[in-house]
Image (spheres, grey):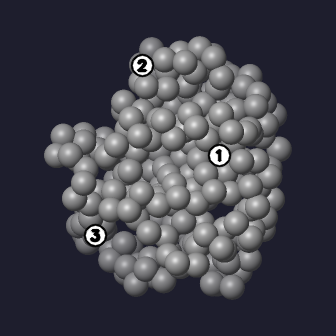
Amino acid sequence: MRPRPGAKMRGVPIVTTPSGTAMHYEVSGAGEPVVLVHGITESGAAWGSIADRLTVSRRVVVVDLPGHGHSGPAASYDVMALAADVAAVIAAEGLDDVRLVGHSLGGVVVSAPAAGEVPVRSVVNVDQSLKLDDFQAMLLAAEPALRDPESFPIVMEALLDGLAGDRLSDAERERLRALRRVDQEVVLGVWMTVLETPTDELAARVVELASAIRCPYLSLHGTDPGPEYTAWLTRLVPTATVETWAGLGHYPHLVDPDRFVRRLDEFWASD
């Protein structure tokens, strides 16, 4: 079943994916296609001036993941389901040889199509480690508070504000806060696999996904992913390059957007 394009919501396109999700997205510019995927609780608008800079010379597709922004709810928020929904937008737009850029949750989401049948030319993963078994320990410690409806918003606000770090401008910090759609069902749905999968099995799933990536892959971090991460990732993904822009925090692309777009251009020119 192909995605059904052509609907409109608030004057912009949506696609009803094979899973039945109404995916909101925006397209601007012309040229080589680039798809931007945001982080958890945010929306495509989080890319802000990055999308504007890329639109000058490229066809830029900015999506709202299911349960985020203006997109509708989904039956499943598992990463593979989210990746399939993004793939439906790519198919509806008729994109070939597409470049994917994802931040945070979006970094995992854009890694999955690169391991599947979507025609992906390259992937840029912004500040998202693929070692989800490491993330699991932190998440399990916070699980009781995350499942409590009263403590959930407090925990999420502290977590998300903490991720912003001290290098993000006050204006950008407030802009991102205004974009948040902090829905407990969606957040727990996204993190359900990490919360409920035994650690060994989770690690094996990640290895399976990462080992299938064949395209050029840039893993760009504003927070240090750890001393062993580069060796771990490049062993699984020989096409990977790992970079850390020390001290820029979880949003290196928004702390220094000009540097980020220059790096994208350099990376894309090298493949």
For disc 3, the neighbor class at 10 Å (few under 14, some 14 to 19, many from 20) is some
The amino acid sitting under disc 3 is: Val
**Which numbered tag is attached to residue 240?**
none
Front in this rendered view, residue 199 or 171: 171
- Location of the N terminus (image quadrant): top right
The span from disc 1 to disc 2 (Cα, nearest Å) is 30 Å
The span from disc 3 to disc 1 (Cα, nearest Å) is 31 Å
- Please give the name of the residue rendered at 59% of the width and 14% of the height, measured from the top-left corner: 30
For disc 1, the neighbor class at 10 Å (few under 14, some 14 to 19, many from 20) is many
The amino acid sitting under disc 1 is: Val
Residue 226, image x and y in percent? 50, 76
Q: Is residue 38 visible?
A: yes
Residue on which disc 1 sits: 123
The image quarter in which residue 175 lies: top left
Residue on which disc 2 sits: 10
The image quarter in which residue 230 lies: bottom right
- Please give the name of the residue rendered at 47% of the width and 35% of the height, measured from the top-left corner: 261
Please tell me which of labels 1 and 2 falls first in the chain: 2
Please tell me which of labels 3 and 1 falls first in the chain: 1
Front in this rendered view, residue 137 or 148: 137
- Please give the name of the residue rendered at 24% of the width and 54% of the height, measured from the top-left corner: 167
Residue 193, image x and y in percent? 60, 70
For disc 2, the neighbor class at 10 Å (few under 14, some 14 to 19, many from 20) is few
Residue 115, image x and y in percent? 77, 53
Residue on which disc 3 sits: 155
Left or right for 152, reference 103: left
